[in-house]
Image: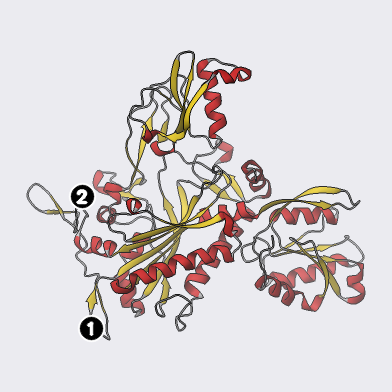
Amino acid sequence: MEMEKLVSLCRRRGFLFQSSEIYGGLNGFWDYGPLGVELKRNVKSAWWHDMISGHDELTQQPGAPSTYEMVGIDSAIIMHPHVWKCSGHYDLFHDMMVDCRQTNKRYRFDQVRGRWAEAKGQKVFVSTVAENEQQEIERQAQKLFKIRAKNADQISWDGAITTLDQLDDLSQVLGPDASEPGTLTEPREFNLMFKTIVGAMGTDEDAAFLRPETAQGIFVNFKNVLDSTRVRVPFGVGQIGKSFRNEITPRNFTFRSREFEQMEIEFFCHPETSRDWYEFWRDRRMKWYTDLGLASDRLRLRDHDQEELSHYSTGTADIEYAFPFLPEGEFGELEGIAHRGDFDLRSHMEGKLDPTSCPLEVETTEDGKPLYKGSGRDLTYRDDISGERFTPHVIEPSSGADRANLAFLCEAFTEDEVPDDKGKMQTRTLMRFHPRIAPIKAAVLPLVKKNGMPEVAKEIYQALKKQFSVFYDEKGAVGRRYRRQDEAGTPFCITVDGQSLDDQTVTVRDRDSLEQSRVKINDIVEEIADRISSYSSRE
């Protein structure tokens, strides 16, 4: 699938728009259109139901060590600055960046990729941040060496495409937008948090940050949740909300944005069973994506190597998807499931973590007073049955609503060949969403705008609208209306025709198989509900 086709469809059909487009857009920010907002709301609703509100706390789930409880919260976007000091974000939440002295552009160090090229007695590492990196590197090299495309074989290449961190010296690197080598600075740290001001004074003491993740809002409310709900360990707290990261180079459509939405769970459990719970959540979250239609051959569960793990983590796995904008064989992170131990709760009890040592250490001023100490609140847990007191371990399944949305869009995009009204084969574009997340569940189409068909169709529309997101369309030939609904991802089209007036039946057309069947008008609501609940992806 060509990514350009999906991006074009998303704009044309109203899934996604560039934010502030009439002013030239703002990189890293996106607006969801009428279909996109429905898709995203459906993804979030499915997650919230399956993980939180629909959870059966009385039945032990397959693979779970025991029964457990789930609750939800919605915490503030702006929190006390000390939250980010104690969590480590203030000191450690950064990317390495490089600047180009010639173009004044800035790049993430690990995203600049290139290859050694040699021609006319000069050897240069030609780099790019473009998605079509091989073509762009070749174009840059031809421009640098002043060689026409038809003479491209005059350039010799050494080694495969690699990242800048594999080089010892940047002096022979041609920056992604530069016209000469040696213009990139040495890499330096760039904190990803958005800074803002709270209050009217505007001094340094009024500085705060937009949250870079939703998780800390759960940790600082750990005791409030315990006291207000009477939940017992093991239990999980879920949250869906906006987060903000000042990405150096947003890229790949909505995959890496500066404003995004997260769907996170912090699951609190006993230290002795935490490994079992980690494996349970890792497997359960993987199954959630496949149940909603992501193909297993484009989805993988990858355990982190030991050197990838945070110093406090005993296990982390990423659910990854083969996004079409990535090179062949590469996967992009869709969700992370991390075993975080008791790091987070201890951080907010005791103070700032020194990343070079353990346990937690409190930073002090010159006169020895604590600086950015923890809250001082007791965030341990006492089991009211056994009397045992401990600091719970945390398992964190953290997913992005926007990345999930993008994965479902990529997976759904399909082109096939179907006959038109005259029997001639033509290319059909359709979005094969699982009906649970499809923006529109059904479209109601009167065959013609006369003979009482619109009146019957509108009655069906109003009956379905009470339960589903439904679309009514009477404009144009029915074949073109089918095609519009295929592009919108509508799984079922209901057509009212002449026979409907005689026997009170309608035609239900299946988006994927194109099969049509007659259904009684009185049974149509139940029929659509049954088809949605019994749907399984078809290859």
Task: Specify the label residue 356 is tagged with.
Answer: 2
For the point 52% across and 34% down, the residue is 130
For the point 56% across and 24% down, the residue is 139
Q: Is residue 406 visible?
A: yes
Label 2 element class: loop
Indicate the quadrant where residue 238 lies. Answer: bottom left
Q: Relative to residue 428, is residue 536 depicted above or below?
A: below
Q: Is residue 270 visible?
A: no
The percent coordinates of residue 331 (x first, y second) are 51, 49
For the point 69% across and 63% down, the residue is 538
The percent coordinates of residue 489 (x first, y second) are 69, 57
Task: Specify the label residue 387 is tagged with.
Answer: 1
- Residue type, label 2: Thr
Foreground mark, 1 or 2, reads 2
Nearer to the camera, 356 or 46: 356
| C-alpha gap between disc 1 and disc 2 | 35 Å
Q: Residues within 10 Å of mark 2 (few under 14, many from 20)?
A: few
Farthest left residue?
367
Task: Specify the label residue 11 is tagged with.
Answer: none
Label 1 element class: loop
In this rendering, position of residue 244 left or right of residue 528: left
Nearer to the camera, 291 or 487: 291
Indicate the quadrant where residue 520 lies. Answer: bottom right
